[in-house]
Image (cartoon, rainbow, N blue to C red):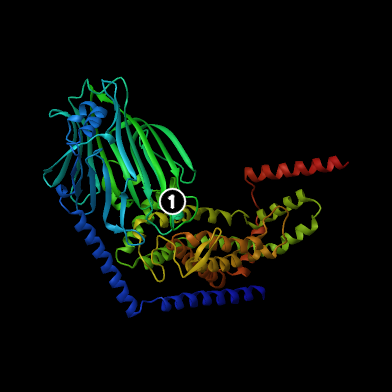
Amino acid sequence: MEEKKLDINSIIGFVLIFGILIFMFYQNQPTPEELEAQKAKQEQVEAEAKKVEEVEETPIKETQQTVNLSDSTAVADYKSSVGAFGFTQASEGTTKLENEVLYLKVANKGGQIVEARMKNFVTYDSVPVYLVKDGNANFALNFSTSDNRTLSTADLYFEPAVTKSGENQVLSMKAKISNNQFLEYRYEMKPNEYLVDFIVRSQGLNGVINGSRPVTLDWGLKGIRHNKSVQYENRYTRLTYNHEDDKISKLSESSDLDEETEQDVKWLSYRQHFFSSILATDNRFKTVEISSKNLVEEESKEELFTKEYSTRAPLDLQGGELSQNMHWYYGPTDVKILDDYKDLGFADSIPFGWGIFGWINRYVFTPFYGFLSSFLPFGIAIIVMTILVRLALSPVTYKSYLSQAKMKVLKPEITEINEKYKDNAMKKQQETMKLYNKAGVSPMSGCVPALMQLPIFYALFMFFPTSFELRQKSFLWAEDLSSYDTIFNLPFTIPFYGDHVSLFPILASVAIFFYMMMTTGQSMQMQQQPGMPNMKFIMYLSPLMMLFFFNNYASGLSLYYFISNLITIFIMLAIKNYILDEDKIHAQIQENKKKPKKENKFQRKMREMMEQAEEQKKTGRR
């Protein structure tokens, strides 16, 4: 009777969940006025982007401001500080490099990139995505000269010259001591690529650069916030690097400050969740000092930055000259784009997960979802993928439920053993194992199927927060499947929960509650064993933890768990009501008991150990 009541309650719960979902489908379908508003907003975004383009396409000559050479004191001070490099004509200004996807500005002072903007992406509040802007990044070479000066290229002026190499744009920045002696930064941008070739070289500086002291490369950056939740974005913002025969390592994503010194480094990625700034070198850096400083203390709408990264690496001189072939990547942390640079291995900077979990995420779920989303709406693609995954795992679910059914059939005999040997724990365990062995039942058989599913669950857990394809893709009431959905904004902040209410985590929590009622209901009816977890407490705690934990997580992940739990419940109901027959299971167990059972070595050893322990216990009593 209790089981029928549970089934009725489960069915009522499913009806309520689907009722809520259908209501939200209806409630959140856009009205004609909302469609017009969305169209107007899109036009406004495009207009703003066009306005930015027009402003930044102003000719360079109009923005340059030459240093006032009539101010003899200023000129003398500058030349005194830079020595022979005072030969370079000092002028403020920037030079632009751009293609269809990337816009860069390179400053005359320092010769470094002072602006990097994605042309096809905007932030959560429709602002163009910048990786470098307003002094958040610095790049410099520090070296000593033969006249005992310590210089930084950040203080030197470079003379720009733009040329073409086929379809590629080439920008040469030179800090000169004469027309034929200089330090050069050479940038080469290809069409439709986020990768920019970057060469640092010197000519005629042998004897000018002091070779007895190291030339060091310094690169620092403060990650600019792009997402609605700065804490969630910061969780996937991390310094990743390739070193020692393509080993991939990371600095901490949560500690206030993490510092390391590494050897033989190929590239360093300053990942900002869905966008990355990467510096790679053809001749590996022999040693690198790196650090990552966490700038986010709590969720805040005002916080502008996430982490502060720094890199310091010595560069070798060759014949007294510098020659280092490098590459800058400013672009999406998107596996489809990063895979274009297989020789550099940039795709390894994406946090797919470790071991087999990461392999499943990268080579199974990522391409599979990419295939589904190529012809289905992004939210529907998640649902279809979830259904197919659960169906593929249904044999494992069957094995797990079959084990539960067998244990349920044996419950009366287990209860009898517990009562008979309630004062003798050793004998009780021994008789219980004998019963399991005779019946052909393993108490661990229900755990093994669950363990088999862990790689799938963890891979999907890592897939949703790192899938670039979900970024700013809407579904129902969720504006962005890579961020949390909001149905109500709270006038206050609840610790560990946030200042908003997300619906998908609520639906997922309700679904997991009914799922746990079905899977733990049997355990709750059994007598609580000392030292065993309270299943009733777990049944109520798990949905509550999910509700709080996922309120600030990607709505796509909550959608997956909601659909996954619903499908699992339906599969279990189908197995229970239409596939498994408890009477047949009971008859089969009774037949198994009649058959002679052969103990394996492990079972025999365990039995002998328990019998010896029991005998010692009896001897001790005498």
Residue 90, x across and y down, in percent = 19, 36
Q: Residue at x 62, y 45 (%)?
A: 600
Q: Nearer the viewer, residue 330 or 526?
A: 330
Residue 565, visible in the rendered structure: no
Q: Nearer the viewer, residue 271 or 247?
A: 271
Q: Residue at x 72, y 59 (%)?
A: 528
Residue 59, x across and y down, in percent = 15, 51
279 shown above or below 377: above
Looking at the rendered structure, the kind of residue marked 1 is Asn
Q: Which residue is mark 1?
A: 234
In the image, is 545 to the left or to the right of 310? Answer: right
Residue 32, visible in the rendered structure: yes
Residue 375, x across and y down, in percent = 30, 66
Residue 524, image quadrant: bottom right
Secondary structure under the numbered disc 1 in the rendered image = helix
Q: Within 10 Å of the Cα at label 1, are there few (<14), some (14-19), or many (20+) other Cα atoms?
A: many
In the image, is 496 to the left or to the right of 77? Answer: right
Q: Nearer the viewer, residue 83 or 453?
A: 83
In the image, is 160 to the left or to the right of 8? Answer: left
Q: Residue at x 72, y 56 (%)?
A: 529
* Quadrant including the N terminus: bottom right
Residue sitting farthest toward the right:
622
Q: Residue at x 27, y 54 (%)?
A: 118
434 shown above or below 410: above
